[in-house]
Image (tube, rainbow, N blue to C red):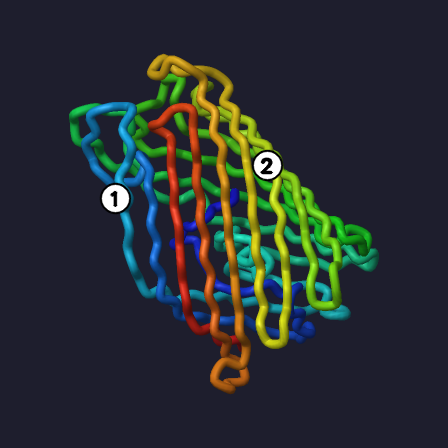
Amino acid sequence: MKKYLALPALFIAIPSFAQPAPARPGFSGEVSLNAVIVSSTSNFNVDGDATISSLENKADSESEGLIAPLGNVAYTFGDGLNQQIYFGTTREDIAVGTLAVQLGYKYSLSSGTVVDVSFLPTVISGETWQNPYELNTPRQETDISGNAYRLQLNSISGSNFSLDLAFATTDVEDDLTAGTDLARDAESYYAKGSYRFTLSRTSFVSPSALYIQHDADGSASSFDAYGAEVSWFNILGRHSLVLTAGFTQRDYDSASTLFSKKRSDDELSLFAAYEYPKFMGWKDWSFISFAGYGDIQSNLTFYDESSYLFAVGLNYKF
């Protein structure tokens, strides 16, 4: 559910709880233009070598630069402006590196709980190899599709505790591993609990714990994941900065017939987001920048991955 360093799913913003804006009825949103550099190293990256000679192969790094116009929009209504329909990536998510387009609905209860239900149509989508393990023969590309559904309970009963739950399906088209213990079609369940500690009037820290259950058609592609994250939010004058670090361990259900041992991954993720409002004295414009790094170290060399992203841009709020 969480897609780090994935440009097609990205809409830029900085956290609303770091710089709260008063609710107002009707439409609001923002749009940005960003210069982006993204790089990834993975044996599943279709921009990499189509032909590999060994399952001990370490993938080459692939990089690209692009200009990305991005944005989001929301409509706020109801008694006390307690309801909102939105499309894009929320400010809360982008601050900690959850880069996914959502269509969602928020409802603020009298108890203080904010119920947020959303549909994520792009977080699973992408491309991969039909048979990533094929040796000495050019591998063929195929599409990954799927949907994700999310329920967030924020500020539960007016407290600093929040809960984030999600369910997703994954479908690999023309998957040549289908019918084997490495088959990749799957259903995934995600749960994350977080608590916010106030450090000062302009700074707070939010640790969280997460669990993922990934049930694939192949037992060697199925796993349970346990992780922890911590985010630090700080406002210094007109500068807003959010830093997030996370660590996740994935334990797979069984060894495959292709490899001699059961797979186990350790994943490290780092993310930073920065905003400077009223850039050049322009009232509704902000200078924005964000950077992310991800690294997966597996006991099976074939699954080692790394990626990074860096972007700068201008954001217009309306």
Picture coordinates of residue 10, whole percent (x, y): 44, 57
Mark 2 packing: few (<14 Cα in 10 Å), some, or many (20+)? some
Would you name the residue on which mark 2 appears?
227
Residue 275 rendering spot, x and y as whole percentages? 53, 69
> How many badges with numbers are in the image?
2
Q: Up-down: is 300 above or below 162? A: above
Given this view, does label 1 or label 2 mark the residue nearer the observer? 2
Identify the element where label 2 is drawn: strand
Q: From where the camera sits, is residue 217 visible?
A: no
| Mark 1 residue crowding within 10 angstroms, few (<14) / some (14–19) / many (20+) | some
Q: Residue at x 76, y 69 (%)?
A: 79
Q: CA distance from mark 1 to mark 2?
A: 29 Å
Under mark 1, the amino acid is: Asp
Q: Which residue reaches farthest bottom? A: 281
Mark 1 vs 2: CB contact within 8 A: no
- List the residue tagged with mark 1: 47
Say which label, 1 or 2, has the lower sequence index: 1
Tell me residue 316's x, y (percent): 48, 76
Residue shown at 49%/80% (left/top)?
279
Q: Residue at coordinates 38% horizontally, 33% vertically from top-left?
A: 304
